[in-house]
Image: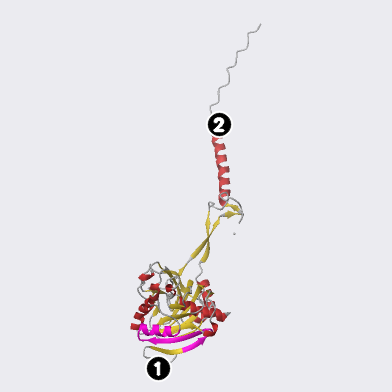
Amino acid sequence: MRAARTLSVVLTLLGIQLTWLISPAWACGCGAMVVGPAQQLAVSDEQSVLRWDGRQEQIVMRLTVTGDARDAAWIMPVPHRATVRLADPAVFGQLARAIAPVHRTRHHFWPRDGEWPFDEHTDGAAAAPAPAQPAVGVVGRQRLGPFDVARLTATDPAALATWLRANGFPLPARLKTALAPYVAEHWEYVAVRLAPDTAGTALRGALDPLHLTFAADRAVYPMRLSRLATTPQSLGLYVLAAHRMEPATAIGGPPPRTVYAGRLTAPGGALGTLARGTPYLTALTQRFPRPARISGDHELRRAATDTPVQQVSYDDELDRVAGVPAWLLTAGVLAVLLAAAAGAVMAVRHARRPVPPPPPVSPPPPPA
């Protein structure tokens, strides 16, 4: 079961950005996916963790996919030679809990919709480089479960396209053009494909994450290939570093939003292992309504301050006294006071009303 899910990871990662040729257009921020003819693959959720300690970067990525793709390949550009392994998916659950909104109770005096009397009812709830090739060099190859992982160098995008075609994955011309800047900057590539003996397994659901590690003197999250997508793109990125981090620019989308920033306190487990030495967690989200405007990769830099950010979720609660709504008690007291005041006014008015004089006394009749 784990092998099948892991396979999905790579296939999904590989199929996302090349799927636009033969199925709904999708681009993955971290790399390019190539799927076979007449197959479809769509990514419903992408989660990534970027860890940077000033010298080395690690990217852990997990995709949730739908479709019928049974063979695929994934290519991701990296600034330096990378090592690749499977990651522990538990890290994403820990991160979700770490940034979960704080729940606080907010009291209100007057009843609202759904509260009596306004309710309608009362229910409650690194490998050494291989010998150089004329165009493409395979610097390392390894088997990860059902995946065949190759680490490549390329002197031009056409050479990379040739290698992919030779391994059964046609490369669209648009992606070849998008890879040109990485080739010019002498980046390397990680290519992953489904091993032959596991062919026939469709990619569905949450895939096991992949863990890439490479040297980096700056924190960068590859996004350039996402400009090929024809549907709006969303980015959710966790960043682990020594301090709070922020994107240097918006790279063609609305400004990224920080939904969490703070130091982790002894997280333990998979997250504790990953965050060792980089205890400050920043969670960023960004939307790209027009992917074609994406102008480059996200470069992350230290924020001006380490000011924490925490989302707050409020639970509104009606003020009560001994289980009775405070507004009802107040209304009752006010009614009593008003009644008493009205009675007092009536009494005062009655007291001030002039008393009519007694009727005159008739003189006694004369004696007979």
Which quadrant of the view contains residue 318?
bottom right
User: Label 2 belongs to which residue?
Assistant: 350
Judged from this view, the residue extending furthest toward the top is 368
Answer with mark 1 or mark 2, whichever residue precedes in sequence: 1
Residue 225 in the image: above or below residue 316: below
Where is residue 190? Give x, y as percent.
43, 84
Residue 131 - label? 1
Residue 147 counted in the magenta span: yes
Label 1: how many Cα within 10 Å (few below 14, some 14–19, many 20+): few
User: Split into 4 quadrants, where in the image is the C terminus?
Assistant: top right
Label 2: how many Cα within 10 Å (few below 14, some 14–19, many 20+): few
Of the pair 129 and 334, the residue shown nearer to us:
129
Q: Residue at x 36, y 83 (%)?
A: 158
User: Split into 4 quadrants, where in the image is the N terminus?
Assistant: bottom right
CA distance separating discs 1 and 2: 114 Å
Judged from this view, the residue extending furthest toward the bottom is 131
Q: Check disc 1 and report its element: helix, strand or loop.
A: loop
Where is residue 145? Give x, y as percent.
54, 84
Q: Amino acid at mark 2?
A: His
Q: Amino acid at mark 1?
A: Pro
Residue 175 counted in the magenta span: no
Where is residue 317? Give x, y as percent.
55, 57
State whether residue 56 appears in this view.
Answer: no
Where is residue 293? Give x, y as percent.
35, 70
- Are the residues at dot 1 and dot 2 in contact (C-beta closer than 8 Å)? no
Residue 75 in the image: above or below residue 293: below
Instruction: Left or right? Give the position of 124 relative to 278.
Output: right
Of the pair 241 and 290, the residue shown nearer to us:
290
User: What is the magenta range?
Assistant: 141-167
According to the image, what is the colour scheme of the structure?
secondary structure
Say how many tags the image has.
Answer: 2
Q: Residue at x 41, y 85 (%)?
A: 163
